[in-house]
Image (cartoon, rainbow, N blue to C red):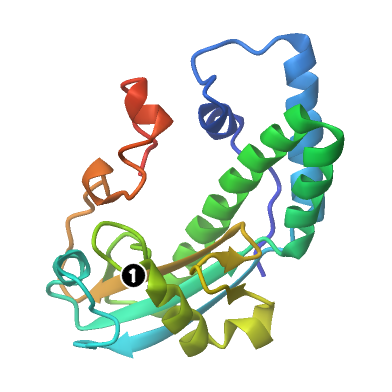
Amino acid sequence: MITLENLSRGEALRYLGGANAEPDKKMLSLLDECEEQVIRRASPKYLYTPLDLPCSELEAGNDIKNHLSGCKKAVLMCATLGADIDKLIRVNQITNLARAVVLDSFASVAIEQVCDKAELEIAEKFPGYYLTFRFSPGYGDYPISLQKYFLTKLDARRKIGLSVNESSILIPSKSVTAVIGLSENPVEQKRRGCAVCNLRKTCRYRKRGEHCGF
């Protein structure tokens, strides 16, 4: 079971576009409140399943084939913060938009931290293998429509209440699907980079000459 004890404030500020600015007392108070609310309301869950490679259903597109090059197996995973976080953000979008934005930022930080912890637990299940970084549908030419394939293989709707709509959007929204390659040889942990991101043309970090860290 994954728990969240604290969330990276620096990452939350980066999502908010204020990583280089010193928050005033009012903002610090808001950050404290929103971090506490997200931790309290989140219900982190994840699933994973290994697959033997090659797998034609999984390896759709050149980017994922390159990512899994040299891997004998792959792990499909999904993670979610649960529906209560979506509800928390929606309510505040009506009552307090500024708070909603900060809550959304902390929720984004939270789901990444959940995935990081899940990845560490998954790694312990496969001793002797080297893991690639997580690669998600929507990166580069990897079809976002594969969200449905991931969730079906993981039986995610029944097990953790995670589903996908006709537009391939995950529900609850603060959720992630990803594939991790398992190799018997060391793998180069390259940063994912802007080239494989579908948001690169509109990314606020790129506009400021920054990088999101992925």
Q: In the rendered picture of this protein, how many numbered marks are placed on residues?
A: 1
Residue extending farthest right: 95
Kindly indicate the quadrant of the structure image that contains residue 208: top left
Q: Determine whether, in the image, residue 73 is placed left or right of residue 2.
A: left
Residue at figure coordinates x 37%, y 36% from the top left: 202
Secondary structure beneath dot 1 equals: strand
Which residue appears at 74% of the width and 19% of the height?
28
Which quadrant: the N terminus? bottom right
Q: Residue tagged by mark 1?
A: 180
Q: Amino acid at mark 1?
A: Ile
**x and y, in percent, of residue 201 in the image:** 31, 38
Q: Is residue 83 left or right of residue 94?
A: left
- Above or below — where is 147 with respect to 115? below
Q: Is residue 55 left or right of residue 3?
A: left
Image coordinates for residue 36, horizontal then vertical, percent: 79, 40
Residue 210 appearing in the image: no
Q: How far across and down, in percent of the image, does residue 186 sit?
A: 17, 64
Depth order, front residue of 167/84: 167
Q: Could you tell me which residue is drawn at 39 percent across and 29 percent down?
A: 205
- Judge whether 94 appears above or below 145 on screen: above
Q: Is residue 67 visible?
A: yes
Front one among 18 and 115? 18
Residue neighbourhood size for the residue with mark 1, other residues' Cα within 10 Å, grouped as few (<14), some (14–19), many (≥20): many
Task: Please tell me in which quadrant of the rendered image residue 51 appears.
Answer: bottom left
Residue 143 place in picture, x, y as percent = 32, 69
Q: Residue at x 71, y 39 (%)?
A: 103
Question: For this view, does 17 lie left or right of residue 130?
Answer: right
Task: Locate the C terminus and report the quarter of the image it occupies.
Answer: top left
